[in-house]
Image (cartoon, helix red, strand yellow):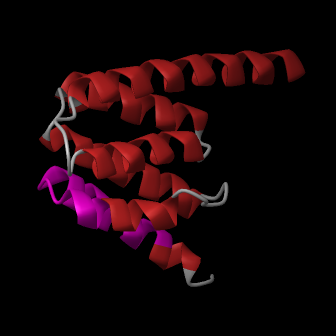
Amino acid sequence: MGRTAYLTPALGVAAGASLWFGLWPVAALFLAFLIGGRREGPTLIADLATFAGLAGHADVLWVALLLAATAVVRVHDPRATLVIFVAAVLALFAYVDWTILSGLLAALTWSRATLTLRRRMRMA
């Protein structure tokens, strides 16, 4: 196992904790390293830890739906991480409604999960 097996989840946990406590510049720094992650198990763990950190400022239901959809898809989506990165940077200058952001990401991830599952069922 390489260093990424430990470093990527550690970055995800650090980003999640930073989001939870509202440390937007620190969260943005950690998220910048997670955007280009590979499609591996450690990157999925990092995504789940990052999204769990949103529960500190967003409605827990939307965060739970986002976590469930991410777990169903089982693939790292750099676009979701990029959206949270941009929101963390914007949070330095303006108010960001994290509940709406989490809800939109959950809806997009569930639609992606539905398409992925439908594609897998066709192949089987």
Stretch in magenta: 8-27
Place of residue 29 in the rendered image (x, y in percent of width and height, measured from the top left): 36, 67
Residue 83 occupies quadrant: top left
Q: Is residue 108 magenta?
A: no
Seen at 31% across and 52% down, the residue is 89
Place of residue 73 in the rendered image (x, y in percent of width and height, measured from the top left): 59, 34
Q: Residue furthest front?
A: 93
Seen at 25% across and 63% down, the residue is 25
Task: Tell me if 11 is positioned left or right of 82 in this view.
Answer: left
- Asked whether the viewer can see residue 78, the reply is yes
On screen, residue 105 above or below 43: above
Q: Nearer the viewer, residue 114 or 92?
A: 92
Seen at 79% across and 20% down, the residue is 119
Q: Residue furthest right?
A: 123
Q: How many marks?
A: 0
Place of residue 6 in the rendered image (x, y in percent of width and height, measured from the top left): 47, 77
User: Considering the image in quadrants, where does the N terminus appear?
Assistant: bottom right
- Asked whether the viewer can see residue 124, the reply is no
Place of residue 103 in the rendered image (x, y in percent of width and height, measured from the top left): 33, 21
User: Considering the image in quadrants, where does the C terminus appear?
Assistant: top right
On screen, residue 3 above or below 94: below
